[in-house]
Image (cartoon, rainbow, N blue to C red):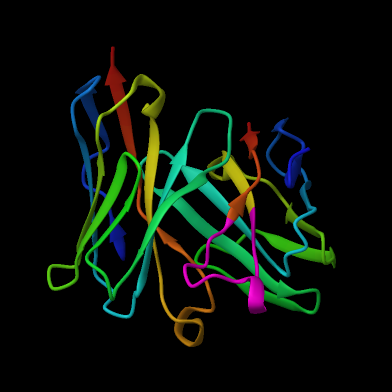
Amino acid sequence: DQQVKQNSPSLSVQEGRISILNCDYTNSMFDYFLWYKKYPAEGPTFLISISSIKDKNEDGRFTVFLNKSAKHLSLHIVPSQPGDSAVYFCAASGFEETSGSRLTFGEGTQLTVNP
Amino acid sequence: DADVTQTPRNRITKTGKRIMLECSQTKGHDRMYWYRQDPGLGLRLIYYSFDVKDINKGEISDGYSVSRQAQAKFSLSLESAIPNQTALYFCATSATGRDRGPYNEQFFGPGTRLTVL
């Protein structure tokens, strides 16, 4: 039972254009959502997050949008740069009482930004 | 220096062998986690520990065991390795109490690539 799903295993975009990575979840108890970025031979690193009380959070070139009714979130990268090429994981968490701070991860999307 | 370190970084072993993967952290976090990553499956939680006396199974704990030797050390053991345990293994930590943000942000080590022949 995949509670967090990233349906696109890969995405390729041109440098300077927008990258949109999508994530869907099924567990209505999830209240916090995070995006992690992973380069080869390194561990995942935290990128950006959003609480369910918001529908948008922006940090520089990165914006995360949350549609709670659709149980869908997306990560927008504008403009995309070659250094953004990495695997992006979507993750979700519930309140401490419900999940004990565990994160549930999606399958990941390999983003390639072409010069 | 890295805040979360894992040893070894790469390991090739044979079916039936006992393997231990080690994780150390200097972040002062109480909570530690072990994940495995497989292509197309993302990161899946094996075990987690909220303090030295607390050990919990994750979603795929069969075939694995853990030991929390100290606040800073959390090791993962494969008692009798099998080929489908070939994967990339990550250790992670997170904070509690006043240092803990609402997002349960976890900090990952660089990973151990394990191959079981």
Quick check: can you spot residue B96? no
- Which contiguous range is marked in magenta? B92-106
Rendered residue at 72%/65% (across/down): B29
Horizontal side, residue A67 vs residue A59: left or right: left
**Res A31 quadrant in image:** bottom left
Quick check: can you spot residue B103? yes
- Nearer to the camera, B29 or A106: B29
Horizontal side, residue A74 vs residue A81: left or right: left
Label tally: 0
Q: Is residue A46 above or below residue B10?
A: below
Rendered residue at 82%/60% (across/down): B72
Q: Position of residue B75 (x, y in %)?
A: 77, 56
- Nearer to the camera, A47 or B73: A47
Q: Is residue B35 above or below residue B60?
A: above
Rendered residue at 58%/29% (across/down): A41
Quadrant where the image shows the C terminus of chain A: top left
Give the residue furthest to the front: A60
Give the residue furthest to the right: B69
Q: Position of residue B38 (x, y in %)?
A: 46, 42
Quadrant where the image shows the N terminus of chain A: bottom left
Q: Position of residue A105 (x, y in %)?
A: 41, 57
Horizontal side, residue B10 vs residue B53: left or right: left
Q: Is residue B97 above or below residue B16?
A: below
